[in-house]
Amino acid sequence: MVQLEEKGAARRIIAAIKQRIHSEEYRPGDRLPSSRALAIEWGVSRTTVTAAYAQLIAEGYLLNRPGARAVVARGLVAAPPPEVSGPTSERVLSAFAERLLALPAPARFHSHRVADLRYGDLNGVDFPMLAWRRALNRASLRRAERLRYSDPQGSAPLREALQSYLWRSRGISCAPERIIVVNGSQQGLDLCARLLLDPGDRFVMEDPGYVLARHAFAASGGVIVPVAVDREGIRTEELPAARLAYVTPSHQYPLGSVLSAARRRALLDWAVEAGGVIVEDDYDGEYRHGVAPIPPLQASAPDRVIYLGTVSKTLSPTLRLGYLVVPRDLVHAFAEAKRLTDRHTPLLEQEALAEFLSSGGYERHVRSIRRRNAERRTALLQALAEECGAHLSVTGADTGLHVVAWLNGVAAEREAAIVEAAREAGIGLYPIGPLYASGSERPAEAGFVIGYAAHDVDVIRRGVAGLAKLFATAG
């Protein structure tokens, strides 16, 4: 405690002497009081004063003279530099930062006492704790003998395991050398934005679509061209010339449509004719409820499509593990960009996932949580029908981990007020409005994206019961 007090006193002495120098009360060459005199003045020990003087000498404010008192150094600024008007960001931030700050602010996180129906959250009880711990332990034993930087593309065992898994589960045939392991799908999107778009380049986005993908491309200087979607997916007849198209063909986010065979072919033809690249986000490809999976675009056009996958919807969004399958001629650029970004994704988690995939544990886990989430989906749809049937139209329920609920006869302008009323009632509810590009045409009715993977059935029912009261009076 005494040492802390002495350090605090030394800091105050240092600040006071600096102020006297800047105000020219102490001028260059002036001698400072002796350590004994200053100790008496401040009511501290000589050791404290000596420490303060030593720090000022180290910073160049004072000059030490053997056998004599310290003097003020020459060449110091007489007064602190004047403050520059305006915030620091106006003086030093790059054009990238300015574009980033101009984007709409993300939704704030709240604690909801009844239910948080946010899409993307998972239920903690579903995490395969014992199996994952075993995989981590095996990975730890393998890494114990040496600590070193790793390949920016990802660990070789994980890329080999992903190669086998993608072939079994999605029909993608690729060499491990074409796989880039990333810190979640968002880093994959950021790499695509920085490597494929220059400021002013146009990029195509499904409308509505994933906001953080739109932000990643826009922050890099890309100019969005929103293209509407319908029951067959993105309207390929409306595709313009552009450098990049970001799509979710297996399960359009958020509306839930699956890209039809004819439009899949049209989209691939567009990429060839426009000289563009398709970024295919297969964000929840493991969840299909009675719907046969469609082959990824990447399987049909490996030289034109970048495939983006993640374990955030199957294991945990906190793990931040995702992967890209990129055309062979882009591998080196993506690997070097990844190296500059963070050298490599944490290796222990990579090798644990490799172990989990290779052992078959991952696919057993996926089958288990697919059944659990099918039960949650059924509970949600039943509750919505029973509690809110007259007020709602539900779409996008065939695949994935969310549905879209449209409020019949309630204007889209009411979304914000309904969300706030739900928050006050302890329920997290999320509007569809922000998923549409600014200025684009959207349905006239209020809509909400409702996720169901984070809660048990009873919590889902309580949440829907609370929403029913709000929806009944929303008009």
Image (spheres, grey):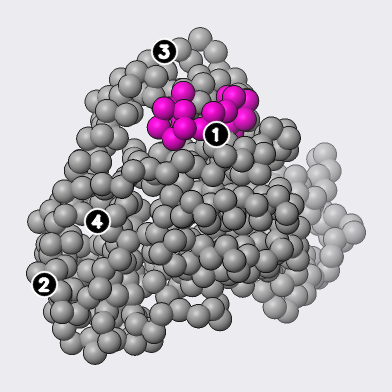
- Where the C terminus falls, by quadrant? bottom left
Q: Nearer the viewer, residue 40 or 199?
A: 199
Determine the secondary structure under disc 1.
strand
Disc with the residue nearer the chain's start (2 vs 3) = 3
Q: Amino acid at mark 2?
A: Glu
Q: Which residue is mark 3?
A: 141
How far across and how far down the image is residue 443, in percent? 41, 80
Q: Is residue 474 above or below residue 255?
A: below
Q: Which residues are magenta?
A: 164-181
- Mark 3 closeness class: few <14, some 14–19, many ≥20 residues within 10 Å: few
Q: Which residue is mark 4?
A: 452
User: Which of the marked residues, 3 or 1, is nearer the chain's N terminus?
Assistant: 3
Residue at the spot x=12%, y=64% of the render?
383
Percent across and percent down for residue 293 are: 38, 43
Give the alpha-carbon distance from disc 1 to disc 2, as whole Å.
44 Å
Q: Seen in the image, is 289 located left or right of residue 458?
A: right
Which mark lies nearer to you, 2 or 3?
A: 2
Q: In the picture provided, is 37 more to the left or to the right than 30?
A: left
Q: Which residue is mark 1?
A: 181
